[in-house]
Image (spheres, coloured by chain):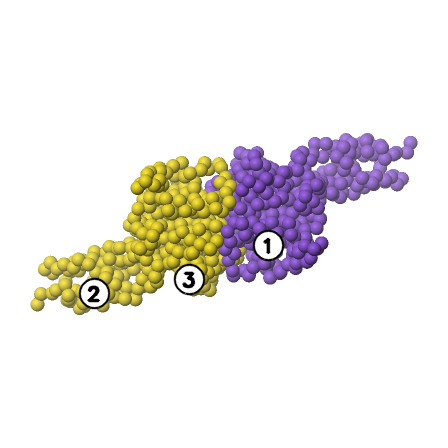
Chain colours: A yellow, B purple
Amino acid sequence: MAITQDNILKALAQVMDPDLKKDLVSLNMIKDISIDGNAIYFTVVLTTPACPLKELIKNDCIDAIHKNVGADFQVFPNMTSDVTSTRSTAPLLPNVKNIIAIASGKGGVGKSTVSANLAVSLAQSGAKVGLIDADIFGPSIPTMFNCEHEQPEVKEINGKNVIIPIEQYGIKLISIGFLTPPDNAVVWRGPMASSALKQFLGDTDWGELDYLLIDLPPGTSDIHLTMVQTIPVTGALIVTTPQKVALADAQKAIAMFKQPQINVPILGLVENMAYFTPEELPENKYFIFGEGGGYKLSERYEIPFLGQIPLVQSIRESGDSGYPSAMKNDVSSEAFEEIAKKAARQIAIRNANMAGTTKVEMTN
Amino acid sequence: MAITQDNILKALAQVMDPDLKKDLVSLNMIKDISIDGNAIYFTVVLTTPACPLKELIKNDCIDAIHKNVGADFQVFPNMTSDVTSTRSTAPLLPNVKNIIAIASGKGGVGKSTVSANLAVSLAQSGAKVGLIDADIFGPSIPTMFNCEHEQPEVKEINGKNVIIPIEQYGIKLISIGFLTPPDNAVVWRGPMASSALKQFLGDTDWGELDYLLIDLPPGTSDIHLTMVQTIPVTGALIVTTPQKVALADAQKAIAMFKQPQINVPILGLVENMAYFTPEELPENKYFIFGEGGGYKLSERYEIPFLGQIPLVQSIRESGDSGYPSAMKNDVSSEAFEEIAKKAARQIAIRNANMAGTTKVEMTN
């Protein structure tokens, strides 16, 4: 008896997406089934190209066919992805599937380092990525991407002047650092800074993106309020070091996103500068900033813990020289890649289970 | 022939203050001369109790008497101090002799750690010290002084409600952390944050102080503008790490204070997290955040370099546990004491050579 597409669909309906807790067929993830003699072809459309379960799901599909259709078939799943979104009807940037804020409360804990490396890892997985440096008073992104002297073009599109982001390492970037000389201070009160962020969101040609990351400044003030009042944010990632004063501020950032009127889902927490290991003593971990504080905080607030990044000189050097660690092939790039995969996974889970975020009404 | 007070004054007129480049008599530093047989007593009034030249000046005084009055005299200089000020006619806080802002541009480089330890070192030298935690969104001072659960009293003084600062380790402290629960985020736009700072300056009972330190938040925005528009600031100290992205932001803080309409003298630069030395490898210095960047920046802008603070686990632990390192007797407390002395010296030099700072006119 010849097998049919239906046989294959029935078999693949046995394969669960472990994150989304439904089978691949119900999730509409199976496309383009074809049968050629003994060979079975189909496409699995994952929720992100950075899916950490890609190999697992692929093997589960092959096993399910062998078990339910026949052990002799050769199975060729084509693993692709279509990043999910809850933003397709958003009035601003509907072609940006996910807007992810990266916050810490405290400055200097590595928000920009995490943002830059997350952007690089996601882009390397095949996603379309943009990054807004929302730190108007201390922009680090131009340095971290080695494009400090770039100046974005402004083009007229449909009668409106629009900023064209700088593209570096395949990532679209915008930062106040591209618009002001590095020696100068931008001494602005909040409304001016907020209007810069509004331009970065509303007057910038982002095109189609899977992920637009927003690297937030420290604190919980104008930029943060303007962001949630300008655009519905898919979710937030929290970066902290294990130091008590950093954890205290991370807690404030969490509290801000959890405020009922703000209500942005928190998708994960990253612990940066977790420990230092000197080259000469590779067995030793020096917990200079304390031990395990990030993990404890994530447990306390029931936030997925995305991982630890050690205090590695090469990460700082990579940032200072403009080539994010994630572009290399070493221990730190693996740490960042793991974190990017886990973040992408949490975004997909969030999109599967929750409605879109609502823009915060302007009350102040 | 009996010696006179005049003989002694003439002798001491040979002693120079190396910083102020004038002799002690012209500087009006000699008081209460008395002669009792073979013993000569007088008081030397230094410009700060934290004077790093105290011993040098004392010995110079003894030498000058021996050389110009007679080698057989016993000389007993009484070294005291009267902190100098350019603020005695200021409309707000005229009893606060010096207002010192501590800024960095970037967050997380150790502004609060430096502020706390500077306060402790100055107080230990005998100065009257106050400290304003102006980081409304990430207050660290209550943690660093182990008084997170204190609540300042409010008293009516001359028909006006006035906040009484918390006193810890002999230092008067005020922080938004005393007024809000630690789990909560203060999600305020700039004007609210600014009005908190105005209260800390204008509605707080500081009494008489030699030094009021203001631990600024990161950035160059509302709090910074409100500070210079509310009160003439004696001078600013810059804290940075050697990391390129931190130096870039320190540069912005310097540029802000140097803006002609702001014009606050910059009294010194401190390089924090200069290097890490594991206990097991005491010879090794790991320049995790880069090497020498702080010194280079101070040279470039001709700012006095006040010193390096190593990345020492005990400094972070001291901060987290609420006992600033400067209260202990170890390498790090010495580093902070040195920096405090150098800062006090630069304040005295500034007061001797420059008129009071002018309050910035409100234009925004």
Q: Looking at the picture, which amino acid does disc 2 mark?
A: Leu
Disc 3: which residue: A303
Is A4 left, or right, of A108 in this rendering? left
Q: Above or below — where is B78 with respect to A336? A: above
User: Can you identify the residue that label 2 sits on?
Assistant: A12
Q: Amino acid at mark 3?
A: Ile
Task: Tell whether A15 sits left or right of A322.
Answer: left
Q: Position of residue A14 (x, y in %)?
A: 22, 68
Q: Rounded to the nearest whole Å, what is the CA distance between mark 1 and mark 3?
A: 29 Å
Q: Residues within 10 Å of mark 1 (few under 14, many from 20)?
A: many
Q: Residue at x 56, y 49 (%)?
A: B194
Q: Position of residue B69 (x, y in %)?
A: 84, 32
Closer-to-camera residue (A155/B363): B363
As helix, strand or loop, the secondary structure at mark 2 comes to helix
Q: Is residue A23 visible?
A: yes
Q: Do the residues at discs 3 and 2 belong to one chain? A: yes
Q: Position of residue B165 (x, y in %)?
A: 65, 55
Residue B96: numbered disc: none
Residue identified by numbered label 1: B175
Quadrant in the picture for the C terminus of chain B: top right
- The structure residue drawn at horizontal position 18% and vertical position 65%, both measured from the top left corner, is A9
The subunit carrying tag 1 is: B
B49 relative to A108 in the view: left or right: right
> Distance from label 3 to label 2 (Cα)?
32 Å
The answer to the question of whether label 2 and label 1 lie on touching residues, with beta carbons closer than 8 A, is no
Left or right: B105, with A263 as reference point? right
Label 3 sits on a secondary structure element that is loop
